[in-house]
Image: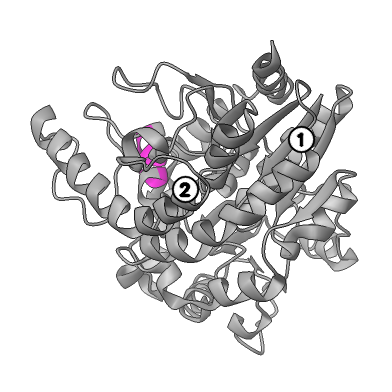
Amino acid sequence: MRVLIYAIGSAGDVHPFLGVGSALQRRGHEVFIATSPYSEQSVVKSGLGFRPLGTVGDFERLQADPNLWHPRKALGVVLRKAAAPTYQPILDIARELHQPGNTVMLGSSLAFGARNARELLGIPFASVHLAPALFVSSYRQPEMHGAPFGQRAPKFLKSLQWSIAAKIVDRHLLPDLNRFRHENGLPPVRDLLRDWWHSPDRVIALFPDWFGPPQPDWLSQVRLTGFPLFDEKGIREIPAEVEAFLNAGEPPIIFTPGSAMAHGQAFFREAVKALSRSGRRGILLSPFTRTIPSPLPENVRHFPYIPFSQVLPRAAAIVYHGGVGTCSQALQAGIPHLVQPMAHDQLDTFSRIRDLGVGLALSPAKFTEKRIVSTLDELLGNPDYKSRAVEISGTFDQDLWMRRTCELVEALLK
């Protein structure tokens, strides 16, 4: 079977698909990953076929947009600048690689172009969502920045809220999408958020039910498997000084605002001040060296990247943005979380961390030296956070989760 995977986003969005693609390849399938050339080396080192979506420059310009992390403006940025430009490349790649009767497609949440290819070429297609925030509900709803009605609101108000949100998404995306569909002889679409976002063939949710319990109003084609947990272990070189620092003292606090956060100066400035104030050791993770304070004190180190599976089990806690990929790795490591949610699905991710009893949060406005220290004191001083985190880590079954994911992909051709 030939599997075409369209993965749009940062490393946290692409890594899960590298994990799924590698697992499918081990089961004897031919796998191609279509993503930004920014991630090309990760794809190639994983031994998978690569096709480009856009250019490195396209990705860097999107990454540099400060509105990418704005709680209200971020959605429009990713829909217009990340999703819309991929419609034609996705269709071109599908036409190039399609083997009738032997091809299936997987698409990340922003790979709307794969729906067009499905309709034009008849290729079975599964939408793959990494986080429960991608599923609207009038029961246990996603917690989003600026949402007027919370979890305790009656269902009719939640439904009204999602109707308004659907209109906002349609306004951002449908003009370009329907223009492309018209040019290719396809009918217009509407209500993308609640319907068209999800493939009618299959929707695969890459998280376990204890993290994102299915709700009564989710679509019937949704199937949950589990976290993919791919982090480039074995294919990304780890600096020798990482091991030396880990062995040199108490378990450090890991600070990372996400692999695509090019504007993390304030995050890291307050992190270093908090570590200096408390005397704790810390590791700062970011590929953007210019965001790191200089010089760093002796108790703090910066590295562009370390596979989380190599460092989080030896950490005291993690302080991060609320990305679901980082979240899953920290849950597996069994350590407490301090979340600073900025945009996208990050607030919802924290809501699930809160419900699981393994972490606390600080808003960006409150992410200051003193509050970081006091919140870490609470996290590390209360043994309940650590014991609950260890308990949850014991429920992970990566092999079972990946096998279920692969079986759902294979079933698309049956």
Q: In this orientation, which residue lies closer to the viewer: 371 or 113? A: 113
Q: Which residue is mark 1?
A: 98
Q: In this orientation, which residue lies closer to the viewer: 77 or 175? A: 175
Q: What main secondary structure does the magenta stretch of the protein show?
A: helix
Q: Is residue 166 visible?
A: yes
The furthest residue to the top: 414
Residue 252 position within the rendered picture, expressed as x and y whole percent measured from the top left: 65, 59
Among the 4 quarters of the image, the one containing residue 408: top right
Residue plotted at (68% across, 38% down): 229
Q: How many marks?
A: 2
Examine the rendered structure and indicate whether residue 167 appears above or below residue 3: below
Residue 15 position within the rendered picture, expressed as x and y whole percent measured from the top left: 69, 47
Q: In this orientation, which residue lies closer to the viewer: 330 or 299? A: 330
Identify which amino acid the numbered label 2 is placed on: Arg
Label 1 or label 2, whichever comes before in sequence order = 1
Residue plotted at (45% across, 58% down): 376
Q: Quadrant location of the N terminus?
A: top right
Residue plotted at (57% across, 77% down): 61
Examine the rendered structure and indicate whether residue 232 appears above or below residue 139: below
Q: Residues within 10 Å of mark 2 (few under 14, many from 20)?
A: some
Figure coloring: one colour
Q: Which mark is residue 181?
A: 2
Residue 40 position within the rendered picture, expressed as x and y whole percent measured from the top left: 80, 59
Q: State which region is magenta.
A: 349-355
Question: Mark 2: which secondary structure?
Answer: helix
Instruction: Verify whether residue 302 appears in magenta.
Output: no
Question: Mark 1: which secondary structure?
Answer: loop
Q: Which mark is residue 364?
A: none
Residue plotted at (50% across, 70% down): 278
Q: Quadrant location of the C terminus?
A: top right
In this rendering, position of residue 266 left or right of residue 354:
right
